[in-house]
Image: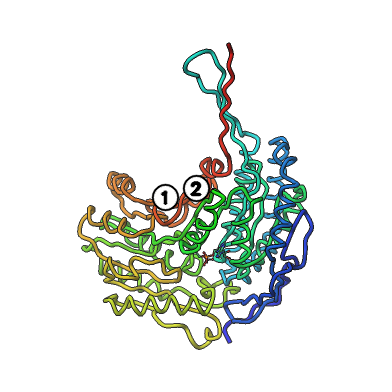
C-alpha cells in the first residue's frame, strides 16, 4: 500500500504557449504515478511535435521585443517572478513532493533557491555591458557585444525539475532569450505551477513557453529549426542521442549530466562531520541527486571507525512518507529505477562489496511504494561496476586508500567529473588536493553548500560541458559579436 498522497490540488495546465495556459497537448495520454504509493495522481494529455511547433512560433514572435526590452525592465520582471515564487512557496512544496516523492521538508528550500536564481540573474539583466578592444594596425574602433541566441530549448530531468529548469531559465532570460521549456512527464507539477507564477509576474506572452512531455517531445525540440540552442540536463545516454540529432543543424548544446562524485576523507578530518556529510550523499534528493557524493574514499588508518560511524548514523535515517515532516528520505522514482538500483547493489556485493546496511527493497508499510533503504557497501574495489557507474539511488560505496596520491588517483578514476568533496583540517592539503580534482565543483569540508546561483556549476569529462550559475552561466546564453570600425 505504501503512503497515500494527501488530497492536494494539482495544477491544471500542462502547456503554456504564447501566454495562454492550455489544459493539455495533442500528444498521447500519460498517467503520472506518485512513487510513495504507486497510485496515479492524474492523467495528463502530453504535448506533440505540433505543440512544439506552436511553442517555438510563440517564442519567435516574442523574441524581437524581449531582446529590445531595456535591461532594467527585464530585471524588474525577474524580480517580480522571484517574489511570486516566494509568496507561493507553500503551494509549491506539496507539488514538489507529489511529482517525484522528494521530501516535503526540502520544499521551502527549493522555492527559496528558485527565487534566488531569478534575483541573482535579474541583477545581471541591467548590467550586460560589452567592452572595447585596443586594436592593432591602423586607427580603428573595435568593440565586443554579447547577444542572446534567440530561443533556447530547455530539457530537464525528473529528479529536480524546478531546480534544473530555473538554473537555465534565469540566466537565459536575463541575457534576452525566449524559452521553450519541457516539463518531464514523470515529474510535471512544479513547472506547471511555475508557469502560473510567470504569468502572475507579467512576462510578455511567448517569452516563456511550456510543453509537458517525454523523450519524443524533447527530440522534436532538438530537431526544431526554430530553436537556436538546447540546454540539456539529464543522463549521458540521452546526451549522446541529442548531440547526434543536433549535429545536422550544427545546433549548440549545453550539457549538465550525471556524476559519481568522490568524497575524500583524510585521517586529519573532523570524522563526525565528515561522516554526516558523507551520509548526505546517499540521502539528499532520495539519493537521486546528480552531484551527490556517492563514492567515499577513506584513509585506511580511520577506515573501519568511519565505516562503523556511517552505519550507525544510517540507522537513524527515517525512510517513509515524504509528506511527513520527520521523514528524511522518500522513495525512488519508479519500479524500473528500483530494479536497476537493486541490480547494481547485488552485483556490487557479488564483486566483493560488504553490505554495511540496506541492500533489500523495503516491505511492510513501505510495500506498494518504491522504497529502497540507504545502502552502504564497504571494501568496494575501485574497478568494480558499482564504483564506476552512477547508481542514481540511495547507495554509497566505500573504498580505503593509503596515501594522498592514491586518493587523488582514485577520485579521478571514473569517466565522470561533476563534484568532489574533500574532508581535511590541513589547509595546504585542502588546496593541493582540490587543485588536482578533475571535477567541475570541489567542496572542502562541505556537502552541497556551494550550490548557490552565484557560482558556476557543471561537469568535466562525461559529466558535461558548459556551466550554469555565476557569470559563466550567463555567458552560456550569449553569443559574442565583434565590431571593427575603420577610423581612417
Ligand atoms: P534522461 O536523460 O533519461 O532524461 C532527461 C530528459 O531528457 C527528460 O526530460 C527526457 O524526457 C528527455 N529525453 C529523453 N530522451 C530524449 C531524446 N532522445 N531527445 C531529447 N530529449 C530526451 O535523464 P533522467 O533519468 O530524467 O535524469 C537522471 C539523470 O540526469 C542522471 O544521470 C542525473 O545525474 C542527471 N542530472 C544532472 C544534473 C546536472 O545538473 N548535472 C541535474 C540533475 C540530473
Direction from residue 356 to residue 322 in the image, left or right: right
Q: Is residue 464 above or below residue 70?
A: below
Residue occupying the point 61% across, 37% down: 147
The reply to whether dot 2 and dot 1 touch (C-beta < 8 Å) is yes
Pinpoint residue 351: horizontal percent, then vertical percent. Answer: 28, 76
Q: From mark 2 to mark 1, how far is it between C-alphas?
A: 9 Å
* Quarter location, residue 325: bottom right
Q: Is residue 23 above or below residue 62?
A: below
Disc number at residue 467? Answer: 2
Residue occupying the point 61% across, 76% down: 34
Direction from residue 45 to residue 440 in the image, left or right: left
Q: The C terminus is located in which quarter?
A: top right
Pinpoint residue 137: horizontal percent, then vertical percent. Answer: 47, 15
Q: Nearer the viewer, residue 488 or 352?
A: 488
Direction top: furthest residue: 488
Lower position in the chain sequence, tag 2 or tag 1: 1
Pinpoint residue 105: horizontal percent, then vertical percent. Answer: 57, 66
Amino acid at each position: 500500500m505504501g503512503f497515500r498522497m494527501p488530497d492536494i490540488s494539482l495544477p491544471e495546465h500542462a502547456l503554456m504557449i504564447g501566454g495562454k495556459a492550455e489544459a493539455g497537448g495533442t500528444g498521447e495520454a500519460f498517467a503520472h504515478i506518485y512513487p510513495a504509493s504507486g497510485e496515479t495522481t492524474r492523467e495528463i494529455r502530453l504535448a506533440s511535435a505540433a505543440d512544439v511547433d506552436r511553442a517555438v512560433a510563440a517564442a519567435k514572435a516574442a523574441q524581437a521585443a524581449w531582446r529590445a526590452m531595456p535591461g532594467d525592465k527585464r530585471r524588474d520582471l525577474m524580480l517580480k517572478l522571484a517574489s511570486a515564487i516566494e509568496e507561493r512557496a507553500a503551494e509549491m512544496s506539496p507539488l514538489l513532493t507529489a511529482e517525484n516523492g522528494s521530501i516535503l521538508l526540502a520544499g521551502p528550500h527549493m522555492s527559496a533557491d528558485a527565487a534566488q536564481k531569478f534575483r541573482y540573474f535579474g541583477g545581471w539583466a541591467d548590467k550586460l555591458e560589452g567592452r572595447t578592444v585596443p586594436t592593432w594596425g591602423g586607427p580603428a574602433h573595435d568593440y565586443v557585444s554579447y547577444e542572446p541566441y534567440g530561443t533556447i530549448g530547455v530539457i530537464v530531468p525528473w529528479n529536480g525539475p524546478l531546480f534544473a529548469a530555473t538554473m537555465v531559465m534565469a540566466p537565459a532570460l536575463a541575457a534576452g532569450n525566449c524559452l521553450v521549456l519541457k516539463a518531464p512527464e514523470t515529474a510535471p507539477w512544479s513547472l506547471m505551477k511555475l508557469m502560473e507564477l510567470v504569468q502572475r509576474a507579467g512576462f510578455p506572452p511567448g517569452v516563456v513557453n511550456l510543453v509537458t512531455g517525454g523523450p519524443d517531445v524533447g527530440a522534436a525540440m532538438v530537431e526544431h529549426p526554430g530553436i537556436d540552442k538546447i540546454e540539456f540536463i539529464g543522463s549521458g545516454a540521452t546526451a549522446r542521442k541529442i548531440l547526434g540529432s543536433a549535429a545536422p543543424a550544427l545546433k549548440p548544446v549545453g550539457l549538465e549530466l550525471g556524476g559519481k562524485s568522490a568524497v575524500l576523507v583524510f585521517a586529519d578530518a573532523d570524522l563526525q562531520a565528515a561522516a554526516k556529510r558523507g551520509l548526505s550523499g546517499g540521502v539528499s534528493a532520495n539519493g537521486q541527486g546528480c552531484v551527490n557524493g556517492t563514492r567515499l574514499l577513506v584513509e585506511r588508518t580511520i577506515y573501519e571507525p568511519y565505516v562503523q560511524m556511517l552505519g550507525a548514523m544510517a540507522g537513524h535515517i527515517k525512510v517513509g512518507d515524504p509528506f511527513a515532516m520527520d521523514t528524511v528520505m522518500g522513495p525512488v522514482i519508479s519500479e524500473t529505477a528500483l530494479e536497476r538500483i537493486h541490480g547494481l547493489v547485488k552485483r556490487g556485493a557479488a564483486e566483493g562489496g560488504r553490505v554495511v546496511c540496506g541492500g533489500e527493497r523495503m516491505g511492510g508499510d513501505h510495500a506498494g511504494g518504491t522504497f529502497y533503504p540507504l545502502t552502504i557497501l564497504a571494501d568496494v574495489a575501485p574497478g568494480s561496476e558499482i564504483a564506476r557507474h552512477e547508481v542514481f539511488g540511495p547507495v554509497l560505496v566505500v573504498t580505503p586508500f593509503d596515501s594522498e596520491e592514491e586518493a587523488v588517483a582514485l577520485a579521478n578514476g571514473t569517466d565522470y567529473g561533476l563534484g568532489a568533496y574533500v574532508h581535511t583540517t590541513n589547509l595546504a592539503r585542502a588546496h593541493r588536493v582540490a587543485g588536482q580534482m578533475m571535477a567541475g565543483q570541489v567542496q572542502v569540508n562541505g556537502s552541497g553548500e556551494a550550490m548557490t546561483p552565484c557560482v558556476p556549476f557543471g561537469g568535466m569529462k562525461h559529466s558535461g560541458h558548459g556551466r550554469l550559475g555565476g557569470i559563466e552561466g550567463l555567458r552560456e546564453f550569449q553569443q559574442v559579436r565583434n565590431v571593427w570600425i575603420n577610423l581612417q
